[in-house]
Image: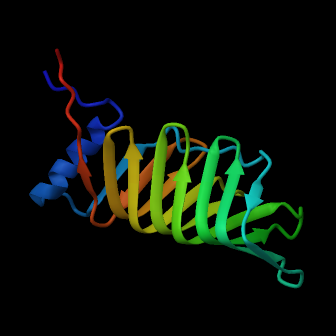
């Protein structure tokens, strides 16, 4: 007997309708329970170079950038850090140049991404690939609410489901 993981079952229905041409747009909603973050946790950044602009309140890390926050790891070629004017805390991270977000159970790749710590959201654009175990889903864009784990993938949504032997 072939079993479909309960996390992916609603996605299968939406994708099936999209492939049959009966869905109004190529998009799907899913839960990415492992792709979450604690915006209040410390942020650690390593990179080859750092440029700081005090006037704009921005910093740019370039070259082999790796960011860690709790169990979340972000890697990119370049990350722009935008600070909150009122608190001085990091408000947003804008990553470009082959971005990878990794947690213990999931990973996502894209051409660029914006992690908004103030709103607890992650927006990934350009050839997005989300992997959950043996299942992979790709799209043009993925928006994630990191508090709830709810995600929406839009534009050219495709997936391959790995079947499990039910014996």
Along the line of sight, the residue nearer the viewer: 148 or 58: 58
Along the line of sight, the residue nearer the viewer: 131 or 141: 131
Q: Residue furthest top?
A: 167
Q: Residue sitting at 52 percent across and 42 percent down? A: 149
Is residue 108 depicted above or below 30 in this figure? Answer: below
Please identify the quarter of the rendering in which residue 157 is found: bottom left
Residue 10 position within the rendered picture, expressed as x and y whole percent measured from the top left = 29, 39
Residue 89 position within the rendered picture, expressed as x and y whole percent measured from the top left = 84, 60
Is residue 122 depicted above or below 105 in this figure? Answer: below
Residue 110 position within the rendered picture, expressed as x and y whole percent measured from the top left = 46, 65
Q: Residue sitting at 77 percent across and 53 percent down? A: 43
Please, which colouring scheme is shown?
rainbow
Q: Residue furthest bottom?
A: 55
Q: Residue sitting at 31 percent across and 38 percent down? A: 8
Query: On the rendered image, what quadrant is the N terminus found in?
Result: top left
**Residue 119 vs residue 8: left or right?**
right
Please identify the quarter of the rendering in which residue 22 is found: bottom left
Residue 145 position within the rendered picture, expressed as x and y whole percent measured from the top left = 55, 50
Is residue 72 depicted above or below 154 in this figure? Answer: above
Along the line of sight, the residue nearer the viewer: 114 or 10: 114
Q: Residue sitting at 34 percent across and 62 percent down? A: 139
**Residue 107 vs residue 95: left or right?**
left
Query: On the rendered image, what quadrant is the C terminus found in?
Result: top left
User: How many discs mark residues in the rendered view?
Assistant: 0
């Amino acid at each position: 007997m072939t079993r479909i993981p309960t996390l992916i079952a609603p996605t299968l229905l939406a994708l099936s309708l999209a492939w049959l041409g009966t869905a109004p747009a190529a998009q799907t909603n899913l839960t990415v329970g492992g792709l979450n973050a604690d915006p209040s946790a410390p942020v650690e950044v390593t990179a080859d170079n750092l440029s700081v602009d005090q006037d704009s309140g921005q910093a740019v890390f370039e070259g082999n950038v790796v960011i860690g926050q709790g169990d979340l790891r972000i890697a990119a070629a370049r990350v722009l850090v935008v600070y909150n004017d009122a608190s001085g805390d990091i408000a947003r991270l804008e990553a470009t140049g082959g971005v990878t977000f990794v947690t213990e159970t999931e990973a996502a790749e894209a051409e660029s991404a914006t992690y908004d710590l103030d709103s607890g959201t992650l927006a990934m654009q350009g050839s997005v690939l989300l992997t959950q175990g043996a299942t992979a889903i790709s799209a043009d864009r993925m928006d994630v609410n990191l508090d709830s784990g709810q995600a929406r993938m839009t534009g050219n949504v495709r997936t391959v489901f790995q079947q499990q032997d039910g014996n």
